[in-house]
Amino acid sequence: MEELQALGLSQLVTVVGDQVIVGFDMKKLAEALHLGTKPHLDPSETVPLIERALEAFEQAVRQMPDEKLEWAISKRERSMRHFTYHVFWRVEVDLEELGTGVAPTRSDAHVRSHASFQDIADYGRTVIEHYRAWSSRQDLDALHRPSPARSKEAARTPAPDHYRNRDVPKSGAERLDLLASHTIQHLRQLYSILENFGITPENRVQDQEWPSVYVLTRLEVE
């Protein structure tokens, strides 16, 4: 990771020939590997998938013991408080950027104001309700159009980590595809973390219940 940061990269990369692909960008991976697959799933598929994944993530967060709020996976410095908050916050970022082209900001103090996993899950519930209301108003065909361009002021500020070093703006369909992938991947990680703590995830969504493209990666939780 230090070598990547020295190159100005904040995420893991995939190298195909002389092409460097930052993060999990299915469109570029499919093109580089000449895969016979759609570059991203349609909003008619991703919109309900995201809601289901968020509902499952909220339930899993409520199972987390509060003594693990500051626990972090050995390879990452992010605490479980930040990790679980981040999944819900990412939804707010995407919905705001889909509407305005400008990402909202947050402070570390705000994240730390959530003193328990129940607090974080309650915050997640408000995000889910916001997402549900947003999705009910969407013209799914219109989501294939490019997202609003970022303002000059926003363009001078760092992009959120999940879009840094990536081509932006993306269409709404592409953003939702990335959001579905992101949420499902972190849900799978949280399930593994719960099991490492000796807790059985309730109403676990099995990998085979998700589109296969979202469960290609091997989980590493240490």
Image: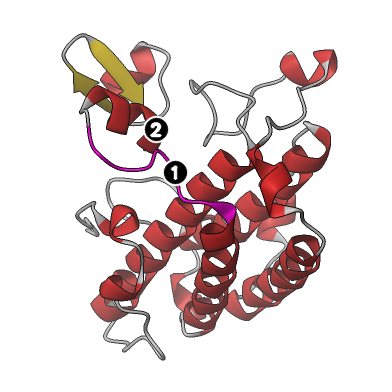
- Say left or right for 94 vs 214: right
In this view of the protein, which residue sits in the foreground, 25 or 145? 145
Give residue 37's position: percent from left, percent from top: 30, 42
The residue positioned 53% from the left and 21% from the top of the image is 167
Residue at 21% across, 8% down:
18
Q: Main secondary structure of the magenta part?
A: loop
Residue 17 at x, y percent in the picture: 16, 13
Q: Residue at x 78, y 67 (%)?
A: 136
Numbered disc 2: secondary structure:
helix
- Asked whether, in this view, residue 141 is left or right of residue 166, the answer is right
- The amino acid type, in three-letter code, at marker 1 is His
Q: Is residue 156 above or below residue 14?
A: above
Circle 1 SS class: loop
Q: Quarter of the image containing the N terminus?
A: top left
Label of residue 40 in the image = 1
> What residue is disc 2 on?
27
Image-based side of 58 in relation to 192, left or right? right
| Image coords of residue 144 (percent x, y) | 63, 39
Tell me how far mark 2 sits from mark 1, CA to CA. 6 Å
Front in this rendered view, residue 83 or 170: 170
Query: In which quadrant is the C terminus drawn?
Result: bottom left
Q: Is residue 39 magenta?
A: yes
- For mark 1, does the 10 Å Cα neighbourhood hold few (<14), some (14 to 19), or many (20 or more) residues? some
At label 2, counting other C-alpha atoms closer than 10 Å, the crowd grade (few under 14, some 14-19, many 20 or more) is: some
Residue 126 falls in which quadrant of the image? bottom right
Depth check: 118 or 128 in front?
128
Q: Are marks 2 and 1 in contact (CB under 8 Å)?
A: yes
Which segment is the magenta one?
A: 35-43
